[in-house]
Amino acid sequence: MPRGFLSLVVEMHHRLPAPGRGPGGDWAVAASGTYWPILKAIATAADAGASEVLTLAVSPAWLALAADPTAQALARAELDRRADGGSDSTGRWHELRRLVVDRWGGDPIAALRRAHESGAVEVIPTTASPAWLPSVADSPVVARAQVALAAAEVEGVLGIAGKAGGIWLPHLSYRPGLEDVIAESGPRYFGVAAEAFRRGTVRPPRDLFGPLITPPGAAAFGVDPEPTQLLTDRGRRFARDPRYDDPRQAAEAVADHAQHFVTAWRESAERRADRSESAPPISLAAVSAHDLGGDWGAGGDWLERTLLILAAPSPWPATTPGRFLDRYPEGPVGLPGGAAGGLAAARPQDSDVLDRCREAADLLADAVGRRDRHGPLGNRALAQMARELLASQALDWSGPPGSASELDPVEGLARAEGHLARFAELAGLLLAGRLDPARLAALEAGPPYLASLDPARLVPR
């Protein structure tokens, strides 16, 4: 039996365009500099025969852009620019472009599906939008929209129906009660911030090194912040090493940092984990894709090398939370504590946008309860109302400074207001029985966000 397991999660999310707009240059830059290098790293690990070395948590917004033909064309054009711009001294952009175009036809969904099928990674959804869940999930319809719709979308897009391993909560922002919706919707596990995990209904007997099994059956894993500090800490992260500025030394830096990361993680887990239980311990760490890209041009290369090291035989091998539960399904029963949040979480930019989201959720719940009376056009309107409500809760306004994900909070709030206005317009037309098919089609236009949304999934089973 292994002495323990290491489990790495990478969260892949990209902000939707502003209401009524299509994909833009921010997607092209992030796709070429962050998302495609990560997918290439995963493909390399899969080609090498690696198994269960990574969990990839993808957001429905990322899936929508990845599946959009316009977004795919923008990313290919950006790769062409980088490969043919005269600064590709090492040929890395030519190699990446060749893989993207020749192997996957410029389609990230194809690459993602192949990675999941290989067994190298476990693909799970994030919630439907990156909301601060403790502020909005007191509405049953919002909780189901965030969890059930996201699980159904990832399963449908990737063709893995019935196999949603888990769900990744934004900011690890669990609140008690979500476990019921998670278990009902299919995911088997979720991650929780370390401090919340430790102050639940029971003290975890293994600290962060084993899951709690919630009463409805979904497992909660505590996420350890220690292993990924050298990826996320702005003052001392790997990306600050000056060797990355010199193409001749970058490969050496990648090898050093990948080995250091895995070695330090294994040594930390060995030192802190309790192995007195029948199941071996598991150490779960998580990082955003944006910490592996942007100004760190070698982040994808680092991930590739790290996955290959994790795949090598070791007393602390890699696994995914889903595969861990396949082997060791039992654990102490309890609930983690809820995520703490300040005024900024409940009232971003001192606005009442989340209060208005809750009011809109009540209206949507009433309309969904009457869905049998609305007919096909009315149910299309209900689906679009749910999309607008979820998008208005997307508090993904900030990102690493200078990155493609950076957005001024004032603009972020304006986008949320725009989605709420579109929700109100649809609600008014639906209640008045005056839906306009052309207007509805215009509101539905854009990247296929939650394209398979079925309003019936918002109703308790």
Image (cartoon, rainbow, N blue to C red):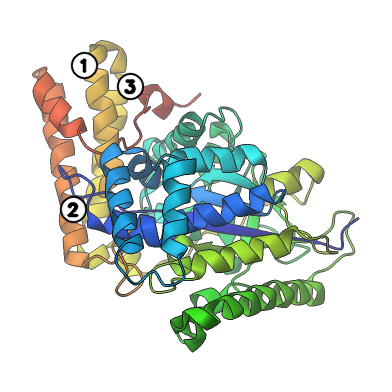
The count of marks equals: 3
Q: Which secondary structure lies at badge 3? A: helix
Q: Which of marks 2 and 1 is nearer the N terminus?
A: 1
The residue at the point 60 percent across, 62 percent down is 304
The answer to whether residue 55 is seen in the rendering is no
Please tell me how crowded label 1 is: few (under 14), some (14-19), or many (20+) other residues with Cα within 10 Å: some
To which residue does mark 2 refer? Answer: 415
Assign a secondary structure to mark 1. helix
Residue 361 position (above or below residue 246): above
User: 357 or 263: nearer the eye?
Assistant: 263
Kind of residue indicated by mark 1:
Leu
Residue tagged by mark 3? 369
* Percent position of residue 368, x then y: 31, 24
Real-space Cα separation, disc 2 to disc 1, in angstroms: 26 Å
Residue topped by disc 1: 377
Instruction: Please state if 97 lies on the left or on the right of 258 as rendered.
Output: left
* Horizontal relation, residue 204 to residue 39: left or right: right
Disc 3 versus disc 2: distance between alpha carbons?
28 Å
Q: Give the residue at x 51% y 43%.
A: 112
Amino acid tagged 3: Gly
Do the residues under discs 2 and 1 have CB atoms within 8 angstroms?
Answer: no
